Image: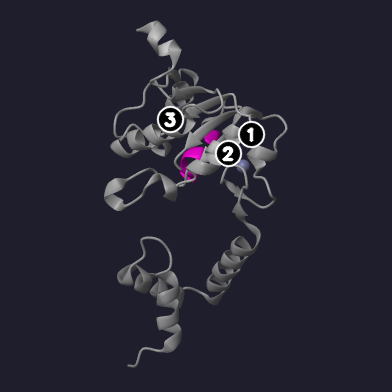
């Protein structure tokens, strides 16, 4: 039996998604073929709806249907406290945990030299611009305690050093080394944010005062 073009075309389309190779794309096509036409129509409509109405928040990088996402547009949130996270999963985990009244900044990944992800591939510059505008008083680094997380913390600190004065802190309690932020349970996450620890820049006089 000759493979028809619609199948090839759908396989190609699925393969544009992250981490989808030939095998997975073929499985998806099989599911569409076996599924009812209504399901395929629903999937196609949902894809088009998201593609046409959802984009990244101009401030934090979260999903948004307006210029600002729901968090950034919320007048009750403290815009001077910015929690820096790897991505959307972590933002959702922290929002589900509740208790955080500030806003977020999504980096869109972590620095990973092995995979060729440098600071320029992340949304580090927009974070620097937010700080430079002077509206940020505190930055909480909610980045995972992994090698990539540590690399990223290093670049964030390097970028902020010598710039506008901000308090820098990191999530502390109950975050085991190597863990992913979004895998932590709500209670642990809430405690880790509440018991955050201050981070000092190497040239910060406060560090010398402590030493
Ligand atoms: Zn936002």
Secondary element at tag 2: helix
Q: What element carries label 1?
A: loop
Q: Does the magenta stretch include residue 95?
A: yes
Viewer can see residue 34: no
Magenta residues, dominant SS class: helix
| Image position, residue 133 (x, y; %) | 63, 34
Answer yes or no: do the residues labelled 1 and 2 have beta carbons within 8 Å? yes
Judge the density around disc 1: few (<14), some (14-19), many (≥20) Cα neighbours within 10 Å: few
**Residue 209 lies in quadrant:** top left
Q: Which of marks 3 and 1 is nearer the N terminus?
A: 1
Indicate the colouring scheme: one colour
Q: Which residue lies furthest to the left in this view?
A: 114
Residue 154 position, x and y percent, is 37, 32
Mark 3: few/some/many CA within 10 Å (<14, 14-19, 20+): some
| Residue numbers of the magenta segment | 87-96
Residue furthest right in the image: 75
Vertical arrangement, residue 101 with respect to residue 43, above or below: above
Asked if the beta carbon under badge 1 is closer than 8 A to the nearest atom of ligand 1, the reply is no
Which quadrant of the figure contains the C terminus?
top left
Which residue, given by chain and number where applicable, does mark 2 sit on? 129
Say which mark, if any, is on residue 133: 1
| Mark 3 touches mark 1? (CB < 8 Å) | no
Q: Position of residue 128 (x, y in %)?
A: 53, 37
The residue lying at 42 percent from left, 32 percent from top is 158
Left or right, 136 with reference to 153: right
Quarter holding the N terminus is: bottom left
Give the secondary structure at mark 3.
Answer: helix
Specify whether residue 75 is in view: yes
Q: Distance between the residues labelled 2 and 3?
A: 14 Å
Crowd tier of the residue under label 2, counting other residues whose Cα lies within 10 Å: few below 14, some 14–19, many 20 or above: few
Residue located beneath label 3 in the image: 157
Closer to the camera in the image, 174 or 86: 86
């Amino acid at each position: 039996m000759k493979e028809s073009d619609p199948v090839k075309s759908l396989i190609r389309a699925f393969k544009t998604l992250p981490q989808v190779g030939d095998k997975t794309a073929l499985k998806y096509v099989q599911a569409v073929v076996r599924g009812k036409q209504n399901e395929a129509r629903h999937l196609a409509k949902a894809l088009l709806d998201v593609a046409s109405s959802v984009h990244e928040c101009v401030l934090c990088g979260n999903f948004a249907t307006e210029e600002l996402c729901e968090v950034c547009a919320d007048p009750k949130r403290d815009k001077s406290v910015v929690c820096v996270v790897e991505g959307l999963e972590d933002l959702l985990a922290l929002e589900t945990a509740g208790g955080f009244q500030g806003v977020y900044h999504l980096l869109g990944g972590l620095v990973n030299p092995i995979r060729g992800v440098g600071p320029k591939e992340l949304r580090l510059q927009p974070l620097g611009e937010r700080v430079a505008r002077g509206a940020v008083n505190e930055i909480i680094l909610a980045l995972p305690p992994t090698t990539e997380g540590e690399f990223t913390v290093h670049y964030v600190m390097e970028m902020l050093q010598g710039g506008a004065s901000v308090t820098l802190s990191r999530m502390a309690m109950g975050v085991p080394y190597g863990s992913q932020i979004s895998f932590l349970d709500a209670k642990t996450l809430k405690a880790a944010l509440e018991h955050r620890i201050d981070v000092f820049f190497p040239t910060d006089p406060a560090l010398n005062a402590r030493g």
